[in-house]
């Protein structure tokens, strides 16, 4: 009898154990993840967040020849807290008293607060961009239906300095123009999940690394940039320019040290601008005809093709007839017997035509392509454009003649500065760039300079450089001379094409100067372009700016003199 009862009890125990084991198997093995998540949900909450946008910095270092110094930087674009005040109107017991109290604390009218509350029953923004004083006053009120929300915003500490270079963060959270636009996907913070546990407020470490955008360090030197912009402001006062641009770069690497535009704007208040053209960076987004600063290229082509030598002579009669058209020197003067150097020193149009007629149209166009005038430079700025110069390629003999002295051929300032580097860089072309390095957490990616193969030989580059030294020492570019230093450069005055492409304005010019120094060991290259200065076409308004900026850089970098 006892044996039978024991067997029954054992059987039930076995059945019970089987049920427990199967239940545990079901819970822990088959549905383990579900219950684990359910348990986690009781002690943690999840919220979708976006990582911080990467920040942008530029250099402010002395005696570095433009090399980035991590110890001396200035912030160009950063993130800052921006608090807004909101309430849930349906929870407010006494709207009149609530509005009156809040209005007094934030310096607004009671009616304005009431109107905002009346717009929604669930969520009403009372004020954005609260000041520190606002926050202090509001916290003193200790109102239970008043809430603060942090909405981080983009802030540009340097205000209008380098505004076209940096661009801005648009209302939709996307970068617009310049660096902000070109590197938007790299700067942009990523979306992720924030995990909040009871007693803790943690963001998964792997997610945190992934969420924040990368930081950018620019090649721009703050001091040179500031000086360049100040000189453009000075030009506005002195010669009433419509606009102007200055580029400074390292001709051996393509590092851009300054990219200055006038007029400029404050990226913090971009929405207040009515003329959207001001956002465009004329360096990369506007095409122009360069005029006489193009003549060194024409000289280089003729020398490289061995159609002339530096010792050859040329006789200038003041004009040159080509079919039904006639080319004149810009000042209608006759210069008589001249050396090849004299063509550049006195900026003789007929001399440039003489040089271009020494080579075939195909050869001339081949060099235009080699110099990069038919395609974008690839500079890391949003919206770069270029002209393929299709009109010239299909042009007449007269169009090729005028192209030899920079009329009827188009380019951007950045294309011109990049191409001009061949004279300072032994014939090699460089790719310009503005971001020195990209950092993300402990990772760092440096930009390696891109130097292309020779467009012209080192011999030709040296010969043209010698001629451009003469331009500054004894030619029309003498206004650019800095005592004690050999600088190489070329003046330019160009007519401005009509918007319909048929002819030129009679009362508008572009005056420019491009050059580098010290000429025998180049450290910097500068392009100054002034749009429609209110002076005569024969005046040289760009050369003095080149001189002042060159002198500033020479002193700033403490470059030893070439002679006493």
Image (cartoon, grey):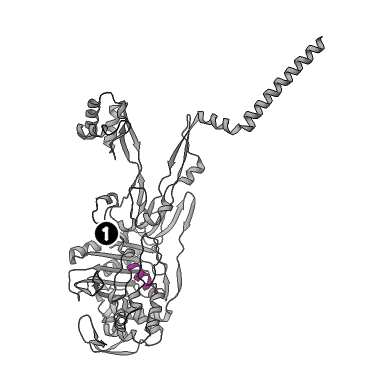
Residue 555 visible in the current orientation: no
Q: How far across and how far down the image is residue 200, in percent? A: 47, 32
Position of residue 181 relative to residue 196, above or below, is: below
Q: Which image quarter is the N terminus in?
A: top right
Q: Is residue 35 left or right of residue 397?
A: right
Which segment did they paint magenta? 406-422
Q: Which image quarter is the C terminus in?
A: bottom left
Q: How far across and how far down the image is residue 473, in percent? A: 28, 78
Count of picture labels: 1
Residue 274 picture quarter: bottom left
Residue 183 visible in the current orientation: yes
Position of residue 34 relative to residue 410, above or below, is: above
What element does badge 1 sit on?
helix
Residue 525 drawn in magenta: no
Which residue is nearer to you in this view: 412 or 276? 276
Residue at x-position 29% and y-position 39%: 128
Residue at x-position 20% and y-position 68%: 533
Residue that label 1 marks? 277
Residue 419 drawn in magenta: yes
Residue 138 picture quarter: top left
Q: How far across and how far down the image is residue 194, in percent? A: 46, 38
Which residue is nearer to you in this view: 470 or 82? 82
Q: Which residue is at the far top? A: 1
Q: Residues within 10 Å of mark 1 (few under 14, many from 20)?
A: few
Residue at x-position 45% and y-position 69%: 451
Which residue is nearer to you in this view: 250 or 40? 40
Q: How far across and how far down the image is residue 277, in percent? A: 27, 59
């Amino acid at each position: 009898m006892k044996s039978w009862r024991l067997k029954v009890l054992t059987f039930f125990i076995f059945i019970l154990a089987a049920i427990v084991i199967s239940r545990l198997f079901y819970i822990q093995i088959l549905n383990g993840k579900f219950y684990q998540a359910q348990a986690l949900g009781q002690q943690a909450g999840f919220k979708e967040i976006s990582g911080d946008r990467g920040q942008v910095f530029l250099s402010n270092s002395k005696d570095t020849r433009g090399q980035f110094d991590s110890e001396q930087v200035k912030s160009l674009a950063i993130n800052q807290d921006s608090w807004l005040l909101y309430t849930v109107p349906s929870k407010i017991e006494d709207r009149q008293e609530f509005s009156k109290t809040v209005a007094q604390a934030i310096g607004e009218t009671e009616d304005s607060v009431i109107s905002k509350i009346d717009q929604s029953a669930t969520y009403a923004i009372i004020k954005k961009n609260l000041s520190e004083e606002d926050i202090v006053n509001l916290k003193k009120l200790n109102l239970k239906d008043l809430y603060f929300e942090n909405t981080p915003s983009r802030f540009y500490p340097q205000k209008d300095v380098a505004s076209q270079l940096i661009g801005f963060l648009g209302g939709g959270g996307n970068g617009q123009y310049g660096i902000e636009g070109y590197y938007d996907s790299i700067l942009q913070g990523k979306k992720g999940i924030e995990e909040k546990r009871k007693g803790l407020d943690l963001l998964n470490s792997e997610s945190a690394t992934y969420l924040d955008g990368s930081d950018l360090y620019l090649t721009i030197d703050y001091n040179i940039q500031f000086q360049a912009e100040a000189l453009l402001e000075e030009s506005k006062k002195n010669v009433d320019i419509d606009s102007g641009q200055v580029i400074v770069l390292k001709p051996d690497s393509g590092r851009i040290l300054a990219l200055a535009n006038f007029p400029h704007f404050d990226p913090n208040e971009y929405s207040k601008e009515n003329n959207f053209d001001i956002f465009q960076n004329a360096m990369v987004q506007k095409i122009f005809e360069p005029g006489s600063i193009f003549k060194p290229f024409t000289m280089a082509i003729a020398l490289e093709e061995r159609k002339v030598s530096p010792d050859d002579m040329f006789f200038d009669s003041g004009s040159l007839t080509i079919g039904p058209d006639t080319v004149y020197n810009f000042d209608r003067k006759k210069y008589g017997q001249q050396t090849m150097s004299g063509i550049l020193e006195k900026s003789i149009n007929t001399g440039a035509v003489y040089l271009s007629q020494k080579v075939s149209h195909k050869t001339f166009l081949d060099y235009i392509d080699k110099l990069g005038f038919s395609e974008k430079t690839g500079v890391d700025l949003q919206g770069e454009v270029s002209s393929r110069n299709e009109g010239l390629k299909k042009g007449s003999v007269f169009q090729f003649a005028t192209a030899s002295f920079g009329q009827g051929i188009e380019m951007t300032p950045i294309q011109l500065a990049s191409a001009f580097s061949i004279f300072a860089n032994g014939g090699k072309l460089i790719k310009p760039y503005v971001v020195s390095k990209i950092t993300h957490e402990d990772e760092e990616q440096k930009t390696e300079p891109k130097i292309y193969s020779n467009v012209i030989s080192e011999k030709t580059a040296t010969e043209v450089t010698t001629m451009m030294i003469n331009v500054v020492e004894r030619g029309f570019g003498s206004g650019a001379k800095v005592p004690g230093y050999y600088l190489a450069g070329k003046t330019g005055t160009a007519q401005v094409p009509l918007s319909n492409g048929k002819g030129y304005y009679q009362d508008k010019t572009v005056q420019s100067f491009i050059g580098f120094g010290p000429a025998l060991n180049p450290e910097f290259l500068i392009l100054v372009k002034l749009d429609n200065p209110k002076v005569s076409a024969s005046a040289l308004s760009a050369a003095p700016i080149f001189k002042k900026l060159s002198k500033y850089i020479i002193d700033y970098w403490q470059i030893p003199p070439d002679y006493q």
